[in-house]
Image (cartoon, rainbow, N blue to C red):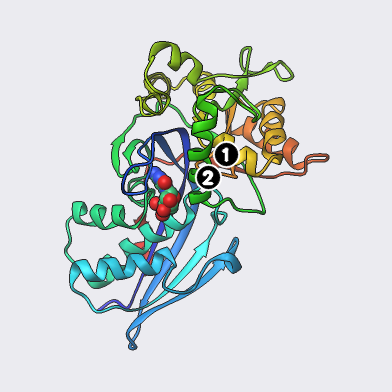
């Protein structure tokens, strides 16, 4: 019997993140466009003799990752074992590339890779649908980490519809030393929802409905660096849909989906939206200057990913991404900027390394 299995899973960005009102389960319904990018978490699972789960973590942000039973990879192993009727006795080694608490779903990627590695080791024979169900119970972003590519996510993010993308997509990711806690960003959205619904904004960027803020894009055509920075996005939606703000948040982002299908990157850049962005900007005010700096450096659009604080800046090409990243890394900004490419797949086993 094989004693070790290795699997990898990618980071995700949210090109669109619409939030609805918190439901009785404590979760907010979402309408989101996920995209997997080539920052990979790598998980090695090894069978051992003693029962239980032992976690080891190396790589980016490793000291901030819990090694106990709260670790999402440990929970993934236990959940799969329960589902498959297996006794757990494994070491899980997580090699991190995705920043911790960065809005890039690093913990969810760890869980997805752990599910695949344990599934291979234990030869559970579970169907892909069973695995997806286990994934959905673990966290909102775990099913997408399994699936990857680009997809529309609904519900908590577990109802996924793959989306075609007609072009290579290059991003510059501006990461932060500090993390932002997802539950806190959703709680801030709840508070802001009441306040902003009565018309106040108080955060950088246009807040044109409850808690909703578009990503930033140039007012003019792509490449007009230095032109006015004009937030775009849900304003147009509001005119089209005179529904309540939270209902508008759950509307399918049809224009963005069409732009992705056409491979129209300037339009994609204009349509980046994240309803949690005002909350992230309030918690980490330095993000406002970074969003503007990404545009001034030539990005087609820039948006906070998920609950932040990572900023995703869309680039017209690989060369453009390299240039934008170099500008952002230089003084006075001195940002941590990484070039990343959208990938078609999701979590997968590394067969030759097992
Ligand atoms: O699913 P995940 O573990 O990433 O979510 C962490 C927390 O974020 C949840 O417990 C909940 O408080 C909040 N959340 C939410 N609505 C979502 C996703 C997460 O309120 N759709």
Front-most of residues 3 and 197 = 197
In x, y percent, where is residue 285? 69, 40
Circles 1 and 2 in contact, beta carbons < 8 Å = yes
Task: Tell me if mark 2 has few (under 14), some (14-19) or many (20+) residues whose alpha carbon lies within 10 angstroms of its own.
Answer: many
Of helix, strand and loop, which one carries label 2? Answer: helix
* 351 relative to 305, above or below: below
Q: Identify the disc placed on residue 216.
A: none
Front-most of residues 197 and 235 = 197
According to the picture, the residue beneath numbered tag 1 turns out to be 279
In x, y percent, where is residue 98? 54, 54
Q: Can residue 341 be seen in this view?
A: no
In x, y percent, where is residue 188? 53, 42
Residue sitting farthest toward the bottom: 50
Which quadrant: the N terminus? bottom left
In x, y percent, where is residue 235? 50, 16
Q: Identify the disc placed on residue 185.
A: 2
The structure residue drawn at horizontal position 37% and vertical position 46%, both measured from the top left corner, is: 27
| Mark 2 Cβ inside 8 Å of ligand 1 | yes
* 352 relative to 306, above or below: below
The structure residue drawn at horizontal position 51% and vertical position 20%, both measured from the top left corner, is: 233
* Residue 196 appears left or right of 252: right
Front-most of residues 70 and 226 = 70
Of helix, strand and loop, which one carries label 1? Answer: helix
């Amino acid at each position: 019997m094989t004693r070790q299995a290795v699997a990898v899973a990618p980071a995700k960005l949210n090109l669109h993140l619409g939030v609805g009102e918190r439901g009785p389960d404590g979760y907010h319904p979402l309408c989101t466009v996920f995209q997997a990018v080539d920052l990979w978490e790598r998980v090695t699972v090894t069978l051992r003799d003693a029962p239980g789960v032992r976690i080891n973590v190396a790589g980016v942000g490793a000291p901030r990752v819990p090694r106990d039973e709260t670790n999402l990879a440990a929970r993934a192993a236990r959940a799969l074992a329960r589902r498959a009727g297996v006794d757990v006795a494994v070491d899980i080694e997580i090699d991190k590339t995705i920043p911790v608490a960065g809005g890039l779903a690093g913990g969810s990627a760890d869980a997805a890779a752990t599910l695949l590695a344990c599934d291979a080791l234990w030869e559970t024979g579970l169907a892909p649908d069973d695995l997806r169900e286990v994934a959905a119970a673990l966290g909102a972003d775990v099913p997408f980490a399994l699936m990857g590519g680009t997809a529309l996510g609904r519900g908590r993010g577990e109802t996924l519809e793959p989306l075609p993308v007609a072009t290579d997509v290059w991003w510059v990711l501006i990461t932060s030393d500090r993390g932002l806690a997802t539950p806190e960003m959703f709680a801030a959205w709840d508070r802001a929802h009441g306040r902003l619904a009565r018309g106040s904004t108080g955060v950088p960027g246009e807040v044109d409905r409850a808690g909703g803020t578009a990503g930033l894009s140039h007012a003019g055509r792509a490449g007009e660096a230095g032109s006015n920075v004009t937030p775009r996005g849900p304003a147009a939606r509001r005119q089209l849909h005179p529904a309540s703000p939270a209902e508008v948040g759950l509307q399918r982002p049809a224009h963005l989906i069409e732009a992705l299908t056409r491979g129209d990157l300037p339009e994609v850049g204009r349509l980046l939206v994240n309803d949690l962005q005002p909350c992230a900007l309030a918690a980490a005010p330095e993000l406002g200057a970074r969003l503007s700096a990404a545009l001034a450096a030539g990005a087609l659009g820039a948006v906070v990913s998920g609950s932040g604080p990572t900023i995703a800046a869309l680039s017209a090409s690989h060369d453009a991404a390299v240039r934008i990243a170099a500008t952002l890394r230089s003084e006075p900004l001195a940002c941590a900027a990484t070039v990343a490419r959208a990938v078609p797949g999701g979590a997968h086993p590394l067969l030759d390394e097992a």
